Amino acid sequence: MFDWKFNLKFADCEVELEDISGWFKNNDGGPYLQKFQHKYAKFCGARHAFGVSSGSASIYIALKACGIGEGHHVAVPAYTHIGTVAPVVLAGARPVFVDVDEYGNLDPSDLDSMKGKIKKDGKNIDAVIAVHQLGLPCKMDEIIEVSDGTFIIEDASHSLGAEYKGKQVGTLGDIGCFSVGGGRTKIIGVGEGGMITTNNDSLAEKCKNIRNHGDRNTDVDYFCFNFRMSDLNAAIGYMMMDRVPFLIDWQIKNAEYIIENLPDYFDVLPTPGDVKTIRYIIGCGYRGRSRDGFLSQLNRFQIGPRQFVGGGYTKLVSDVLFYTHFAKYSDLTMSKRLRDESVWIDYHRYPRTKTEIDDLLNVLRSFPSQ
């Protein structure tokens, strides 16, 4: 006979797993998923948290929990990862692309303008997805005011631990959505996964059911599917939660060191006084003649296994062939400017050392005056 029990070690923590699936004959999932969810909710200051299969799945589940489907319209920035927008189409709704501000976050004034423009066509904005870009929270008070009771979903994939006026992202709107994927690109990496947070009990029940064939268990009148997180992934997340403050602190300190020592052909906007940014990526303005020419030269230097300095979102989602017919109302002026002029520096998260960062800064300083 086989003994299916095995131990999983992470740093100084060890867990024993008997079942690595995501199905435990109840809607709450396995023991480590429940522990992970509890720790995540407590860290964010949320009443509920639910682990799911990916960050994009978390947005889809959030949309369906809010009742979004065919005939509905969802405001979403065009300057974002395509994983923010694809769930809108998967849910049966139509994305309405909204411009961003100079920080890359959803622009409340353009959102207000979009509401007026589509209303002339006899349509309404039924939900808003506010993306906290690069670890910096959106102007949530203004977005909430403009939205006027419309469901607000936070895409906080970049921003675990960021705060707006003393409150954690993921608790500012109706539902918060996080990515906890791998590749050392998130504070927590469980291999593949997402997390949903909410303080709304009714939305929480729907999210829990939608991710786990809840229509089979509780006989609900809305469609549910399998978006579960396995207990193996959850165990990794559970073990990492205690290190989150350390990892965020490491990330912020290294980012601030880079910003203080960047060559003067980069501009970094000051952080607004009412937010805490976790500096997921350092977004810079580039004051040279050719951003693309600079990046092409820089890429000839071997800085590491990944491209740690790049152009960010070099294509708007509204420019992707499948999505072009949704781009009707906004001219996306700032989104296009950031697409064409921004430089993103992604070289400061754990375990990056100061010595390695100094090597990068020396490479940047080695370029002639821009």
Image (spheres, grey):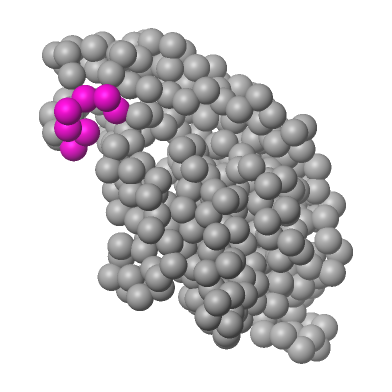
Q: Quadrant of residue 297?
A: top left
Q: Looking at the picture, how far across and down is residue 15, in whole percent?
A: 69, 43
* Image: 23 above or below 270: below
The C terminus is located in which quarter? top left
Q: Give the residue at x 75% y 48%.
A: 171
* Image: 7 above or below 267: below
Q: Looking at the picture, how far across and down is residue 24, in whole percent?
A: 74, 70
Q: Which residues are magenta?
A: 286-292
Asked if residue 166 lies left or right of residue 94, the reply is: right
The N terminus is located in which quarter? bottom right
> Is residue 228 in view from this perspective?
no
On whether residue 338 falls in the magenta region, the answer is no
Asked if residue 281 lies left or right of residue 187, the reply is: left
Q: Give the residue at x 21% y 33%.
A: 291
Q: Looking at the picture, how far across and down is residue 368, in whole percent?
A: 14, 14
> Is residue 174 in view from this perspective?
yes
* Image: 135 above or below 339: above
Q: Looking at the picture, how far across and down is residue 121, in whole percent?
A: 53, 80
Q: Nearer the viewer, residue 367 or 161?
A: 367
Q: Nearer the viewer, residue 71 or 334?
A: 334
